Image (cartoon, helix red, strand yellow):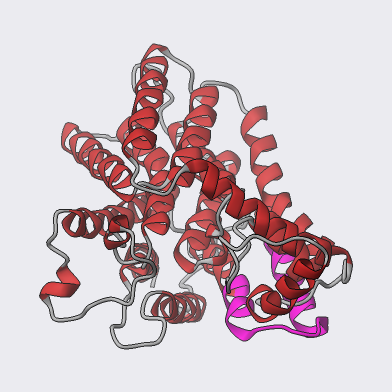
């Protein structure tokens, strides 16, 4: 059973981004949610041949806080939706099940990089005009008419692919620094090139924001001459990514985000303790938009339906109340405190996992990665890896500053 746990958890993790079911109303998100729930149940159901691995206390309590906020809002709020509650409960449970099963941090990180790289390969094929889904006879119901929308990978949207790549790049650096053989190091660098190229192909400026935040944290935790060179390279890379992005002008994008926030933010204090319920933005936005227009908040460019407010912190406050916002901030703050208190240079695994978590948190300021199955699982597994690495009693992974 120990061997079964050792491979089934990472396999489920790596395959999550690739779960697609053509023909469904939501062919990208629903299969991933189903896969996540099935994987979580399977991991929890596997009998253990010995004592389960101990859970870091911080991981246990932050996960309990997150799950409790979702259940509280789902049970007490007037307009809960079932899929967001399931996702909110299943993602941290999946991470807990991986740690409880004794899967080491490096295999988990490797699985995340493999899954993200496979998604990026599909995105790059789409960018080159060779969409695998189209070649198989399925035209995906992608949103919008922008040329860059064709780079949707296996997630359904180029912004989603970009965020996943940004979160995974820091972990790829950690794998390269932790590689025990030259072959593994070369494979890690190859994955890094694929992920970086896919990020540029998506034209996602939010992903560039996340990547910048991740590199800043990684550099802070593992400062060396090579890291300084890497920071300069990423700064150049970010400039190129923004310059070649085919997305609409950044001032228009910013105006759209501000419009959404102005429409939704007044609703946060109508139900501060339980929120309006998970999924309430989707259900309530048409009414909120009409009422906001009567109050003078209107912009014809952005009038219409929306599923999310493109800010996970505001959305957590509106849908799950103050407990929801606090449960989002708690693991973020906890991991940062743990990482900062560790002697520097930190281990590559701790630095990479912390940077991946920060990338997702930064993207959440202008997007909704923590409301999507793949990115939310990536976030919680990164948190689990960071806390697992920081509390491990065994010798840490090499901290040789000769590597990145």
Number of numbered discs visible in the structure rendering: 0
Left or right: 299, with 5 as reference point: right
Residue closest to the far top: 225
Left or right: 62, with 295 as reference point: left
Above or below residue 11? Residue 103 is above
Q: Residue at x 48, y 18 (%)?
A: 223
Compare residues 290 and 378 and report the one nearer the observer: 290
Q: Which image quarter holds the N terminus?
A: bottom left
Above or below residue 255? Residue 393 is above
Image quarter of residue 307 = bottom right
**Image position, residue 115 (x, y; %):** 31, 58
**Image position, residue 34 (x, y; %):** 44, 82
Q: Is residue 184 visible in the rendered structure shown here?
A: yes
Q: Which image quarter holds the C terminus?
A: top left
Q: Residue at x 36, y 57 (%)?
A: 158
Compare residues 165 and 295 and report the one nearer the observer: 295
Residue 63 belongs to the span the image colors magenta? yes
Q: Is residue 388 visible in the rendered structure shown here?
A: no
- Magenta segment boundaries in residue numbering: 62-89
Helix, strand or loop for the magenta stretch, by majority: helix
Compare residues 9 and 225 and report the one nearer the observer: 225
Left or right: 1, with 325 as reference point: left
Compare residues 325 and 151 and report the one nearer the observer: 151
**Image position, residue 275 (x, y; %):** 81, 71
**Image position, residue 209 (x, y; %):** 50, 39
Q: Residue at x 70, y 70 (%)?
A: 67
Image quarter of residue 358 = top right
Residue 99 belongs to the span the image colors magenta? no
């Amino acid at each position: 059973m120990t061997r079964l746990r050792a491979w089934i958890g990472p396999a489920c993790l790596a395959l999550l981004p690739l779960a697609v079911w053509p023909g469904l109303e939501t062919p990208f998100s629903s299969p991933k949610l189903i896969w996540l729930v099935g994987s979580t149940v399977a991991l929890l159901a596997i009998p253990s041949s010995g004592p389960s691995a101990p859970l870091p206390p911080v991981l246990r309590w932050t996960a309990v806080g997150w799950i409790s906020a979702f259940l509280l809002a789902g049970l007490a709020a007037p307009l809960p939706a079932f899929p967001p509650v399931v996702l909110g409960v299943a993602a941290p449970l999946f991470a807990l099940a991986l740690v409880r099963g004794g899967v080491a941090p490096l295999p988990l990180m490797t699985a995340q990089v493999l899954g993200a790289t496979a998604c990026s390969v599909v995105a790059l094929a789409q960018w080159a005009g060779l969409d695998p889904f189209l070649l198989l006879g399925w035209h995906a119901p992608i949103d919008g008419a922008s040329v860059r929308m064709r780079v949707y990978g296996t997630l359904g949207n180029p912004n989603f692919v970009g965020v996943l790549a940004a979160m995974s790049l820091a972990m790829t650096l950690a794998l390269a620094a932790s590689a025990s053989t030259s072959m593994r190091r070369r494979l890690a660098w190859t994955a890094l090139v694929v992920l970086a190229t896919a990020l540029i192909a998506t034209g996602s400026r939010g992903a560039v924001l996340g990547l910048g935040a991740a590199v800043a944290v990684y550099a802070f935790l593992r400062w060396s001459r090579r890291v300084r060179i890497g920071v300069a390279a990423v700064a150049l890379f970010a400039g190129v990514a923004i310059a070649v992005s085919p997305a609409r002008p950044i001032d228009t994008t910013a105006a759209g985000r501000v419009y959404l926030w102005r429409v939704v933010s007044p609703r946060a204090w109508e139900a501060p303790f339980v929120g309006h319920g998970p999924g309430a933005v989707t259900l309530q936005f048409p009414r909120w938009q009409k009422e906001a227009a009567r109050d003078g908040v209107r912009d014809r460019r952005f009038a219409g339906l929306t599923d999310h407010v493109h800010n996970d912190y505001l959305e957590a406050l509106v849908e799950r109340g103050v407990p929801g916002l606090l449960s989002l901030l708690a693991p973020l703050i906890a991991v940062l405190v743990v990482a900062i208190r560790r002697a520097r240079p930190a281990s590559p695994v701790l630095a990479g996992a912390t940077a991946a978590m920060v990338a997702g948190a930064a993207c959440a300021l202008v997007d909704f990665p923590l409301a999507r199955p793949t990115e939310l699982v990536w976030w919680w597994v990164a948190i689990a890896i960071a806390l697992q690495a920081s509390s491990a009693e065994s010798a840490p992974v090499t901290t040789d500053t000769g590597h990145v």
